[in-house]
Amino acid sequence: MPESANIVLPEGSIEKQTTRLNLGPTHPATHGVFQNILEMDGERIIKAESTVGYIHRAFEKLAERRPLYQITTLTDRLNYCSAPLNNMGWHMTCEKLLNVKTPKRVDYLRVIIMELSRISDHLICNSIVGVDTGAYTGFLYVMQYRELIYEIYEEVCGSRLTTNMGRIGGFERNFTDTAFQKIEKFLEEFPVVWKEFESLFMRNRIFIERTKGTGAISAEKALNYSFTGPNLRAAGIDYDVRVHAPYSSYEDFDFIIPVGTTGDNYDRFMVRGEEVWQSLSIIRQAYEKVQSFKGTEADVYHADAPEYYLPAKEDVYTKMEALIYHFKIVMGETEIPVGEVYHSIEGANGELGFYLVSDGGRTPYRLHFRRPCFIYYQAYEEIVNGAMLSDAIITMSSLNLIAGEMDA
């Protein structure tokens, strides 16, 4: 039940009663397990207090007790809407420490999967924003293409949601013809559906009135809070890790960085929508580059780093040397250099970084995950202060706060 509270006003004024409302941790309008204690004056929020920790899983402490390969299953569960991005960001961090150079074909295959993950994430975010403004149809319509992306994941690695995709140095196996056929099908069919989805919202009077001018944050405040990704770009700052610190051969691709002006819910929706189109363009370019490899080059799907790359499963079952290497790599018995590295990628929600400190032992001495959603949530109190309750729900959706990144 909501609690009542009395606000102390200056002498001679009329006493005004407010209501304290718990939005979460298990509220139907919250997108994960986190709590906001709202002081309400009718439908308007006059004070908000955010709480994290309901889904605390001690990722960073667990990582300090695990060899490098066993950490991939932890990164899966950060932003579970785009798990392969987390996996590959972690593998690139390891490669930076181990001085492993990946071939171009591996880079391009990674780009295809990472951009599919970005589309999957933005697709969920924008369709949920639609749901929270009262439009459920668009969500149901585009979900079938998230399923197609999951089918591509499944063809590449055998998993769908928490994928454990990729390996240090590349992929576990080469992409099959079926995987490429599914990618072709997605590139052919999804743009038509996404265009229809956008036509439902972009010039919809009800949607615009619900989102324009609500949940806004200025560029200055966004930078002060250390915003990155679509939420920063919606405020007018064109920072994108893929451009400013290219990785996985992103410098080989042509794309633009969409930016907004006001940093409100509508701009965040529009920026993510345009980023989907840019990701489709990048996937097409990467697909063409992959198809250009011929002969033995077309069979390359990992770096030449036998000390760190898991041997083929059929060899593990039949050859003693491969079995020994497999055991040593998975259990962390291979030598890891002493060093300190930071690597970041442009995750679906912003800059996803890994700060890895190694003392040469079998596990990281220290590992810190820079989770963009955790940073956004710090600003949520200020953003919704003075807003209507219904606007606060849409703001939570357009910031795309994922509970898995809240508390590591």
Image (spheres, grey):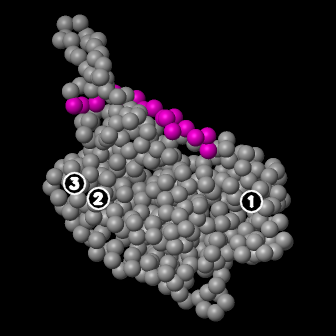
Residue 46 in magenta stretch: yes
User: Quick one: quadrant of the N terminus?
Assistant: top left
Residue of label 1: 330
Q: How many neighbours does mark 1 have within 10 angstroms: few (below 14), some (14-19), or many (20 or more)?
A: some
Label 3 residue SS: loop
Indicate which disc residue 139 carries.
Answer: 2
Q: Do callouts 1 and 2 mark residues in contact (Cβ within 8 Å)?
A: no
Q: Do callouts 1 and 3 mark residues in contact (Cβ within 8 Å)?
A: no
Indicate whether 267 appears above or below 105. Answer: above
Q: In the image, what residue occupies the spot 67% across and 90% down?
A: 296
Marks 3/2: CA–CA distance? 8 Å
Indicate whether 267 appears above or below 44. Answer: below
Residue lying farthest to the left in this orientation: 205
The picture places residue 367, in percent across and down from the top left corner, at 68, 47
Q: Is residue 55 left or right of residue 168?
A: left
Indicate whether 11 appears above or below 274. Answer: above
Q: How many neighbours does mark 3 have within 10 angstroms: few (below 14), some (14-19), or many (20 or more)?
A: some
Residue lying farthest to the top in this orientation: 11
Q: How many neighbours does mark 2 have within 10 angstroms: few (below 14), some (14-19), or many (20 or more)?
A: some
**Mark 1: amino acid:** Val
Circle 1 or circle 3, nearest the eye: 1
Circle 1 or circle 2, nearest the eye: 1
Q: In the image, what residue occupies the spot 58% across and 65% down?
A: 165
The picture places residue 309, in percent across and down from the top left corner, at 73, 69
Residue lying farthest to the front in this orientation: 318
Q: Do callouts 3 and 2 mark residues in contact (Cβ within 8 Å)?
A: yes
Marks 1/3: CA–CA distance? 47 Å
Marks 1/2: CA–CA distance? 40 Å
Badge 1 or badge 3: first in the primary sequence: 3
Label 1 residue SS: helix
Residue of label 3: 135
